């Protein structure tokens, strides 16, 4: 079973940038759509971005569109989330996930395998 492993989180000032990485442990991400979600304290897990296996299709939530960019490097079995113009409201634990079920790519229920998450904190 493929297991996503996130890295790259940290503390950054508002307006700054971070790049999150999601590497495959075990099997590969081959053929799978990959997604990034986030969860802030006291809030539900929410969709951030997703990318198709080919990389030709990307999807973003309205709250990050134009600031975040998702990409994948298939040769390295890695998915990235470039986060620019960060805001304090972007503070959350960010999770990488593998879509293993049908349904919309925006729904957490479509993803069957999750990483352990990486903390992103944006100070004002």
Image (cartoon, grey):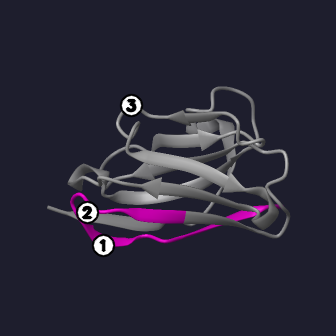
Boundaries of the magenta span: 1-20
- Mark 3 or 2, nearer chain start: 3
The picture quadrant where one finds residue 62 is: top left
**SS category of the residue bearing label 3:** loop
Residue 29 highlighted magenta (yes or no): no
Main secondary structure of the magenta stretch: strand
Q: Residue 122 carries which label?
A: 2
Viewport quadrant of the N terminus? bottom right
Alpha carbons under labels 2 and 1: distance apart: 6 Å
Q: Do the residues labelled 2 and 1 touch (CB within 8 Å)?
A: yes
**Residue identified by numbered label 3:** 62
Alpha carbons under labels 3 and 2: distance apart: 19 Å
Does residue 1 appear to the left or right of 115 in the view shown? right
Along the line of sight, which residue is nearer the eye, 25 or 54? 54
Does residue 113 appear to the left or right of 67 in the view shown? right
- Mark 3 or 1, nearer chain start: 1
Mark 2, Cα crowd under 10 Å, few <14 / some 14-19 / many 20+, is some
**SS category of the residue bearing label 1:** strand
Identified at 68% across, 26% down, the residue is: 103
Residue 14 highlighted magenta (yes or no): yes
**Residue identified by numbered label 1:** 11
Residue 39 visible? The answer is: yes
């Amino acid at each position: 079973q493929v297991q996503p492993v996130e890295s790259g989180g940290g503390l950054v000032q508002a307006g700054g940038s971070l790049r999150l990485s999601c590497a495959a442990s075990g099997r590969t991400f081959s053929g799978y759509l990959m997604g990034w979600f986030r969860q802030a304290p006291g809030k539900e897990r929410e969709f951030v971005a997703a990318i198709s296996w080919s990389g030709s299709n990307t999807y973003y939530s309205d709250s990050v569109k134009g600031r975040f960019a998702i990409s994948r490097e298939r040769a390295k079995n890695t998915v990235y989330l470039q986060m620019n113009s960060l805001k304090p409201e972007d503070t959350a634990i960010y999770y990488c996930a593998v879509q293993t079920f049908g349904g919309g790519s925006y729904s957490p229920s479509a993803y069957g395998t999750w990483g352990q998450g990486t903390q992103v904190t944006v100070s004002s």
